[in-house]
Amino acid sequence: MSLINIIHQPYFIYIIDYLNILSINKLSFCCRSLHDQDLSLHVSTIKSRCGNREKKTLPLYKYINYICKTSKDIFCQDILVSDIHKGMEWSKHNTILYLIAERLLEIHLNTFSNILQYNTTLTNLYLCHNEIDDTGAIILSKAIKYNTTLNVLNISNNLIGDVGTISLADALKKNRTLIRLVLSCNKIGSIGGTAIANALEYNTKIKSLVLSQNQIGNDSAKVFGKILEKNTTLSKLNLHYNNISSEGAIELSRGLEKNIGLTVLQLSSNNIGIDGAYALAHTLIYNTTLVKMNICYNKLCTKGTKAIVKALQYNDTLEILIVSFNNVDIRDKELIEQIKEKNVKMQVIW
């Protein structure tokens, strides 16, 4: 696996933190503000992080390509169109690209999008922390619509609202290669969330969808519920912190009763309450595919939480249930032990 980066210096250390997780054997930099002394520091970091790797994988620092201008007068926001071209030229021989530049202007995104739609090697693209707004999302949508190799797209921590999300959703209807889409920490409301949900009716490739820390609300949750009734390919759905109350949770639960594909559901930090908990409890009796469900921080209270735990007596597929921070006063340990006798893999995290 190879990795190229056009990266804003402060985020560089974030990538270094991932080195023990990713099997990376080559790292190239196109950073206009990374200075010689910084490189020396980071190489030392890389050496220490990679020193315990297996011998069959050569140390990462031996593969570093230091490609950048070192003038201290040039700042990271001064990324040029030529840098984009250079990065995309390298991408012809690599599969992963991190483009983290603090802010990508329309001219950058136009250049990038025009090249990306014809690129046939990139499989993973990370465009986090770039202040990409609706206009930028619309520009990127064209590339997503026609690109035929991209599997993972992460455009989290940007400024994308409903207008840009609608354009992305339209692109998803035609894209046939994306497997994982991350849109967390944007400004997506109910209109954008609904558009993404409806796109899943046409897209049969997406397996993992992350919409955490937006504001899609109950209307979008209801549409997701209807889509999940028939969708069989989506296996992971993250709706953490999206202002979903019991109303949305009830409709989402109805879809999950009939769903036969979803294995992981993240609903933490919403406001589904006791009524939403009852609905999810009913769902667990009939659902046969969920393996992990996170519903912490949802004001379930003792009644709602106990209803869900009791439903596990009839469910032998769920392995991890996270119900912590829900104002629960009573922990029915005897009930949990009975459930574990039936499903030895079960973990209930209070």
Image (tube, helix red, strand yellow):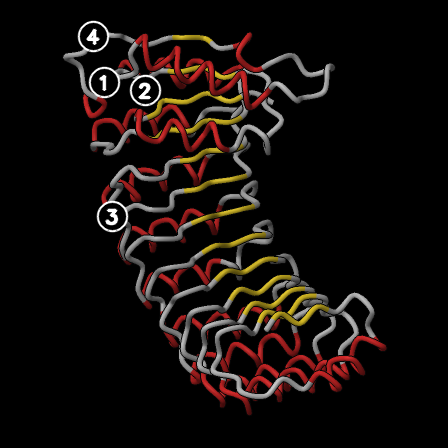
In primary-sequence order, the first of circles 1 and 4 is: 4
Residue under label 3 = 134
Between disc 1 and disc 3, the foreground one is 1
Amino acid on which the number 2 mark rests in the picture: Ile
Residue under label 4 = 71
Question: Separation of disc 1 and disc 3 at Cα?
Answer: 21 Å
In primary-sequence order, the first of circles 2 and 4 is: 4
Residue under label 2 = 84
Question: Separation of disc 2 and disc 1 at Cα?
Answer: 7 Å
Q: In which quarter of the image is the C terminus?
A: bottom right
In primary-sequence order, the first of circles 1 and 3 is: 1
Q: Quadrant of the N terminus?
A: top right
Residue at 42 percent of width and 33 percent of height:
14
The quadrant where residue 339 appears: bottom right
Q: Do the residues labelled 2 and 1 touch (CB within 8 Å)?
A: yes
Which element is circle 1 on? loop
Which element is circle 3 on? helix
Residue at 24 percent of width and 32 percent of height:
104
Residue under label 1 = 80
Residue at 52 percent of width and 74 percent of height:
225
Question: Separation of disc 2 and disc 3 at Cα?
Answer: 20 Å
Residue at 76 percent of width and 83 percent of height:
313
Amino acid on which the number 1 mark rests in the picture: Leu
Q: Where is residue 137 in the image (x, y as percent from the top left)?
A: 30, 44
Say left or right for 314 vs 62. right
Identify which residue, 146 or 316, lies in the foreground: 316
Amino acid on which the number 3 mark rests in the picture: Asp
